[in-house]
Image: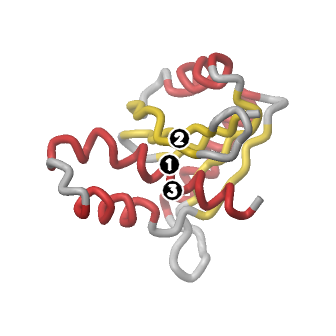
Amino acid sequence: MKILAIDYGSKRIGLALTDEKAMLARGFKTLENNSDLLNKLMEIIKENDVRTVVLGNPKNMDGSLSNQSREVLRFSKLLAQKISPLEVILFDELLSTEEANEIMSFLKTKKKKRKEIRDQIAAEIILRRYLATQ
């Protein structure tokens, strides 16, 4: 049973995927946020035998909904309809992108490459945090 994590952004969508036993998380892919996004996600879910989708929910530090969180909630409803009966789990992603930036800085990732992988790393962080709660 694989789990797919999504770091949803207005321009790019980072994806991370577990192994077959849903124990290990790894960055998987970055997609552009465009009109074909739901179809691309559906293909990825089918091709990788995904059983659960974890969607990062970027709440404010005080736990209230941010503007981006409201957009994620809207997207989660569309995604849930598209992939039904699979489950979409909203999971707090507090500071995952900042942590991804720190990791890339520590690893001295070139700035050009950072844009490509930042969202994948953030999705991997979300997925690892989710797995740690299970």
Secondary structure at numbered mark 1: helix
Counting from the top left corner in percent of width and height, residue 20 is at 70, 32
Q: Marks 3 and 1: CB-CB under 8 Å?
A: yes
Disc 2 residue crowd, few under 14, some 14–19, many 20+, Cα 10 Å: many
- The answer to which image quadrant residue 97 occupies is bottom left
Q: Which mark is residue 123?
A: 1
Furthest-bottom residue in view?
62
Q: Marks 2 and 1: CB-CB under 8 Å?
A: yes
Secondary structure at numbered mark 2: strand
Check the image and report above or below for 81 versus 128: above
Look at label 2 and name its amino acid. Ala
Counting from the top left corner in percent of width and height, residue 24 is at 61, 45
* Real-space CA distance between mark 2 and mark 1, rounded to the nearest whole angstrom: 5 Å
Check the image and report above or below for 1 versus 55: above
Whichever of labels 2 and 3 marks the residue nearer the N terminus, that label is 2
Secondary structure at numbered mark 3: helix
Q: Is residue 107 left or right of residue 95?
A: left
Counting from the top left corner in percent of width and height, residue 25 is at 57, 45
Which quarter of the figure is the N terminus placed in?
top right
* Real-space CA distance between mark 3 and mark 1, rounded to the nearest whole angstrom: 5 Å
Q: Which mark is residue 16?
A: 2
Residue at 38%, 39% in the rendered image: 12
Q: Is residue 12 left or right of residue 62?
A: left
Q: Which residue is mark 3?
A: 125
Look at label 3 and name its amino acid. Ile
Look at label 1 and name its amino acid. Ala
Whichever of labels 2 and 1 marks the residue nearer the N terminus, that label is 2
Residue at 64%, 36% in the rendered image: 19
Q: Marks 2 and 3: CB-CB under 8 Å?
A: no
* Real-space CA distance between mark 2 and mark 3, rounded to the nearest whole angstrom: 9 Å
Q: How is the image coloured?
A: secondary structure
Q: Is residue 93 left or right of residue 51?
A: left
